[in-house]
Image: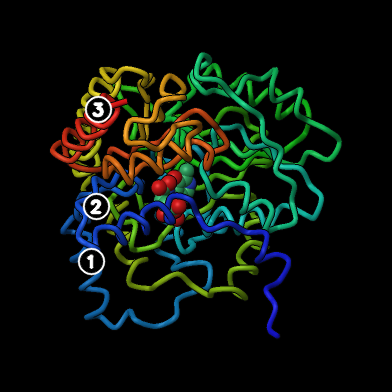
Amino acid sequence: MLQVSRLASSIKPSATLAAAARAKQLQASGVRIRDFSLGEPDFPTPEHVCEAARRAMAAGKTRYTQASGTPELRGAVAKLYGESYGLSVTPEQVLISNGAKHSLHNALAGAISPGDEVIIPTPYWVSYSDLVAMTGGVPVLVPTSMQSGFRLTPEALKAAITPRTRMLLLNAPSNPTGAVYTKAQLEAIARVVLDTGISVLSDEIYERLMFDGREPVCFATLHPDLPGRTITVSGVSKTYAMTGWRIGWSVAPVALAKAMGNIQSQQTSNPCSISQAAALAAITGEQGCVESMRAVFQQRRDLVCRLLNAVPGIRCPVPDGAFYAFFNIEGLYGKAPGGRKISDSASFCDAALEDAHVCLVPGSAFGAEGFARLSFATSNEEIESGVSQLAAWLSKG
Ligand code: PMP
Ligand code: GLU
């Protein structure tokens, strides 16, 4: 009998991808689902990026590249950090991977040994705890509250650090809460990091998706000693509507970047050569498309928060970045609008899907009971219809 390994049996499927698959399944059976499950821009990839991919294919760039990515793309990413943040990065510090999720895996596989503790503030993006566990690391979940804007405080960080703590996994703007930090708040966290000697994995994938004029802060820039203990992860998926192209990157101290590159060279070799050419065009080409998409996300954010907050029992804090509304549903507990009782985030999302045909992701998947996540990376029409279906369903209870 072929057995499933201990590792594989301990891993859950990504809750966001699982919810999206469920919505697609119901759609295929003829039910019209308003699908807010996946965090994936609904815009097409900008035309000049697609054109660069076509040119790459025509020029025969269809072979293996260097396992850590093409020199052109690694160089362009290094330059980007200098231009955007004044951070000096060499191409040797950059590893191009198959999406930012793969970059996170490489970072954890490169820096975490079995038994090392990794601090993850909650609510956290669904994949973090499993990604840590897959390296043999121990995820240590540190709760934040809606009242404190879902931000990790330096005190809570300090209290969670033990002699086995190796790393803090920081994500701002956050998926699922949209929380961002001011520079001063991040500096306070940086002081704890430097005082205690832990390292940081900073997932900055939503860095260009900030609202109301906020500017991104690259964590590694906050102190001259931070680049030596920080791995920064980002990529093109969200900024340039390129989720399917699978290009992410990490910036790490040279020795660690090399070790992570070795892992990648044994595991996947290079990311797709054509996608790398497309990503190069995205980050070096005209940037107007980024601002156009950001402005639309901000307008949708305003719409979705206004509509959700008008539904009795729902409280939706206003996210400062990314494209998710993470709203509180505890006011709905005990109701049974379509016959199914709402007692937690999973029962709420199941009932919303079955009875209102609205697909959301339960807060429990993000380590935060009492909430649900709605991705507003979708049209105004979808948002208006979806929230009105939710409201009509809930009004029956
Ligand atoms: N980090 C966060 C916080 C995300 O939301 C995502 C999106 N899935 C990723 C990393 C991974 O991005 P990618 O699609 O480039 O793997
Ligand atoms: N980041 C997206 C989300 O949270 C994509 C799904 C995934 O990679 O799990 O919905």
Indicate which disc, 1 or 2, sits on the residue closer to the N terminus.
Answer: 1
- Per the image, label 1 sits on a secondary structure element best described as helix
Indicate which disc, 1 or 3, sits on the residue closer to the N terminus.
Answer: 1
User: Of the residues shown, which amino acid type is indicated by label 2?
Assistant: Gly
In the rendered image, the quadrant that contains the N terminus is bottom right
The answer, for residue 77, to whether it is visible in the render is: no
Q: Residue furthest bottom?
A: 1
User: Of the residues shown, which amino acid type is indicated by label 3?
Assistant: Ala
Image vertical order of residue 77 relative to residue 64, above or below: above
* Mark toward the viewer: 2 or 3: 3
Indicate the position of residue 48 as horizontal and vertical percent values: 18, 59
Q: Quadrant of residue 187?
A: top right
The answer, for residue 38, to whether it is visible in the render is: yes
Image vertical order of residue 210 relative to residue 287, above or below: above
Indicate the position of residue 396 as horizontal and vertical percent values: 27, 27
The structure residue drawn at horizontal position 36% and vertical position 52%, both measured from the top left corner, is 237
Image vertical order of residue 134 relative to residue 311, above or below: below
Which residue in the protein does label 3 denote? 391
Q: Quadrant of residue 162?
A: top right
Q: Residue furthest left?
A: 381
The structure residue drawn at horizontal position 26% and vertical position 45%, both measured from the top left corner, is 357
Marks 1 and 2 in Cβ contact (< 8 Å): yes
Q: Quadrant of residue 390?
A: top left
Which residue in the protein does label 1 denote? 52
Indicate the position of residue 222 as horizontal and vertical percent values: 57, 28
Residue 285 image label: 2
The structure residue drawn at horizontal position 67% and vertical position 73%, both measured from the top left corner, is 4
Check disc 2: other Cα within 10 Å, few if <14, some if 14-19, many if 20+.
Answer: few
Relative to 156, is 243 on the left or the right?
A: left
